Image (cartoon, helix red, strand yellow):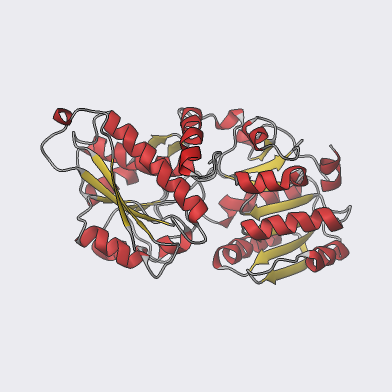
Amino acid sequence: MRGIVLGLGLVLPQTGWTQEPPIKIGTSMALSGPLAGGGRQSQLALQMWAEDVNARGGMLGRKVELVTYDDQASPAQTPGIFSKLVDLDKVNLLIAPYGTVPAAAVMPLAKERRLLLVGQIGYQINSKAKHDMWFNNSPWSDAESWVGGYFRLGQSVGVKRVAFLASDQEFAQNILAGAKKLAQNAGFETVYEQTYPPTTVDFSSMVRSIRAASPDMVFVASYPADSTGIIRAVNEIGIGSSVKLFGGGMVGLQYASVMQALGSQLNGVVNYHTYVPEKTMAFPGIHEFLDRFAKRAVAANVETLGYYVAPFSYASGQILEQAVNATKSLKDDVLADYLRKNEVNTIVGPIRWGADGEWAEPRVVMIQFKDIKDGNVEQFRQEGKQVIVEPERFRTGDLTAPLSKARAR
């Protein structure tokens, strides 16, 4: 367990700070291990936020320092890390670990000690703990908020038969359970359902079985390596002319490395996203942040697009900053009370929370890949490549269906 103290904000002369010690903000990140790609993006984004805060004079006239430990994405480590942050490092504020499983392991500690905890990219983390001082940074609440748009699109194009394919991991299974309820509510008939081990690398037999079942829609809940393998299998084998929609809950199709590797194979796929560079998501400050992030990411050896993770991690810092500035306090209960009652403005748009600490108005979009070429990651910075097809208030183009027609464009 390696700690990293980030004393940032040397832009201002020392005389600009009060004589009080820095405000320490503690967290843990998957800086190594299976979630390191996202964890390192989150770390860089939070560093940038702290630098920006300190360039403005800090919080309450005090410099901000981040105290970060590498949790290796392990839920066995995070409770001990957060105990250390509170008891030994004496941090003033906390941001949750990056990722659902590592963060969920911290919730009992946060609830028992009455600690404010701001989220860091996770799903249904507070569903069991029901901690009233939890505030998620992520634009979803339940399965409907995450993939409900996919099933509404299905209804709009006359889907009757659906196939399900999902990884046998907690997150994917949770999304799958919600998706099956959505399909049932929509009156869709399930013609195929398969859960596969996380170590699966060959999806050809599953794709052939899906094709034989002749669904109108295929819903996939997968992780980055799986998503890549599934898309490639579909392109090699074909999925059948009956399929109007393919995708839905595929993690990885938001990452630059995966998008670049798949290239034109993505065309026609419809999938969830948190942010894409379409005009309807041009929230104040986000373009400027992403431009800066891209330059910093090269030196930090992390993904340069950063759409899926980085803006929301920066927003975690903004959430704390606005609460502290408004209340002139570092007390957990005071800050939590403020966040329950007020909307905050961030680079991912305005956020207010429901009673469970999730977004009162979720903001997940369904995008369709269109006109994607091979070997060019820069194209994903352009409008019109990841077209928002749902919900209506963010829509920037029409859904092209069936999948065969979308792929022929």
Query: Height in image: 14 above or below 211?
Result: above
Residue 85 in the image: state x and y as whole percent: 26, 58
Residue 148 visible in this rendered orientation of the protein: yes
Query: Height in image: 20 above or below 96?
Result: above
Residue at point 14%, 28% (across, down): 15
Residue 318 in the image: state x and y as whole percent: 36, 38
Front one among 367 and 46: 46
Front one among 268 and 115: 268
Front one among 249 and 201: 201
Figure quadrant of the N terminus: bottom left
Query: Height in image: 156 above or below 70?
Result: above
Q: Is residue 314 left or right of residue 175?
A: left
Figure quadrant of the C terminus: top right
Residue 168 in the image: state x and y as whole percent: 62, 70
Residue at far left of view = 19
Residue 28 in the image: state x and y as whole percent: 36, 56
Give the total of numbered labels.
0
Q: Is residue 337 left or right of residue 134?
A: left
Residue at point 77%, 47% (across, down): 265
Q: Is residue 380 left or right of residue 332?
A: right
Front one among 171 and 364: 171
Residue at point 39%, 66% (across, down): 105
Residue 114 visible in this rendered orientation of the protein: no
Residue at far front of view = 299
Residue at point 70%, 66% (across, down): 201
